[in-house]
Each structure stands twice: as structure tokens, then as C-alpha cells.
Image: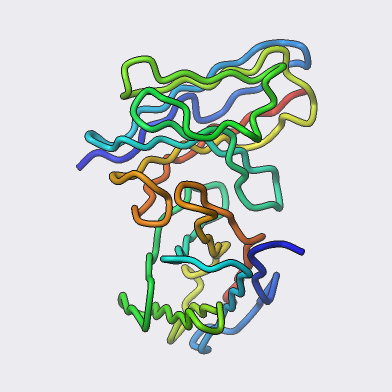
Amino acid sequence: KNEVEQSPQNLTAQEGEFITINCSYSVGISALHWLQQHPGGGIVSLFMLSSGKKKHGRLIATINIQEKHSSLHITASHPRDSAVYICAVPQGAQKLVFGQGTRLTINP
Amino acid sequence: EAGVAQSPRYKIIEKRQSVAFWCNPISGHATLYWYQQILGQGPKLLIQFQNNGVVDDSQLPKDRFSAERLKGVDSTLKIQPAKLEDSAVYLCASSLVNGAGTGELFFGEGSRLTVL
């Protein structure tokens, strides 16, 4: 079993829809990363959070440490949000373990 | 602030040839990571440096891969000889603090390797 599980693996939605991507992990952590990777592009760090909720523009990330679960939400989705979204958690003090990613496609 | 710089962006070689990738992290970032990302998969850590010391290279195929960060700043990753399964994007990332759990990661654009 992977230490980090994301769902869904693929998600296609219409422009304007509310999007939720989930991440579950099996080990205790101090913080969790959400990353975004556009096709052919590098990876951009969206959030690093250890509790509660963070918001940046139309993106919202929440985490429940007790339940070992985090969600990434996108409000009023737009085609430019189409990308792979990756959840990553630290393994021990120094190593990040990545989820397999969620491929999001927003159709106009 | 300049981001993480990587070169080359693209490289095509034949199997058994060698290749080298270069990474210049964000100024002041002590921790540098090399990841391998095969198409359709998440990144896999190859090696992590703290300044010029190796913190974790447990997943680096040491018979063919090598990496160095001699002065604790920029780094090179070498593959010799390359195999078909090495075709991937090689991502470099850096962070300010020691420990992946506490520092935000900054990634380069990646170097896409195709082995024919």
C-alpha cells in the first residue's frame, strides 16, 4: 500500500465547477505539500500546511491531521487549472513521499 | 528572486551513451534534491544534498547514476551508461531549511531525457 493515496486519479469537469481532490496518508506528519504540474512544465508548490485551512485565490487546501487526510479545492474552475495535482508528505525528517497525482482537465 | 535553474531542458541520446544534467538552486537554499519522474508517475527521489553532503541516496542506481554538489551550491547529475528505462524528466528542487517536512520546495523546469 502506498503511503500517500490520491483520489481521483483522473478528473474531468466543466468550466465553473467546484473541484475536490483528496489525499490520504498512512504515517504521522508535521506538514503536507500540494504541488501543481502543468503538461510539459515544472512543478510549482501551491501549499504547505500543517493544520486547518489555507486559501490562495481560488484554491483552498484543508488538512485533518487526526484523520490523516487533506483536500485541495478549486472554486470556479477554469481551463487553465488543467494540470496534475500532487500531494506529498514527509517520511521521517528529511524525505518527501509523493502521491501518484490527480490529472485534472477542465473543459470550456 | 531567480528560481531553480536546470539545463539542458531536453536531451536525446542513444542507450549506453552518457549524459549530464546541471542544477543551480535558489541562492541560500541549503537543501537540494534530484527527482526522476517517469511519464505518468509521481516524482521519485534520487538523491538529497544538505550543503555539499549527501543526506539520502538510497534510491539512486549507483552503478550508473552519480551526483555531486562539490561547493554546496550547484549540482550535476550524471548517467553513464544510459538505459532505455532512464527516459524521464529529471527534476531539481531546493528548499531553505533542513528537512522536507518543514521547508517549501521550489522546483526547476526539469530536464527531459529520451534514451533511444
The image quadrant of residue A14 is bottom right
Query: Image point 43% across, 81% down: which residue?
Result: A62
Residue in front for this viewpoint, A79 or A11: A11
Q: Quadrant of the C terminus of chain B?
A: top right
- Residue B83 locus on image (x, y percent): 78, 22
The image quadrant of residue A91 is bottom right
Q: Is residue A4 left or right of residue B115?
A: left
Query: Image point 48% across, 70% down: which residue?
Result: A81
- Residue A76 locus on image (x, y percent): 44, 86
Query: With respect to residue B67, does B36 lie above or below?
Result: below
Query: With respect to residue B6, does B68 lie above or below?
Result: above
Query: Image point 51% across, 48% down: which residue?
Result: A95
- Residue A70 locus on image (x, y percent): 51, 78
Q: Residue furthest left?
A: B1
Residue in front for this viewpoint, A86 or A12: A86
Residue B6 in sight: yes
Residue in front for this viewpoint, B104 or A35: B104
Q: Quadrant of the N terminus of chain B?
A: top left
- Count of numbered circles in the view: 0
Q: Is residue B13 left or right of residue B15?
A: left
What's the colour scheme? rainbow
Q: Is residue B60 left or right of residue B21?
A: right
Query: Image point 53% across, 68% down: which residue?
Result: A28
Residue B13 in sight: no
Q: Is residue B14 left or right of residue B55?
A: right
The image quadrant of residue A60 is bottom left
- Residue B81 locus on image (x, y percent): 72, 13
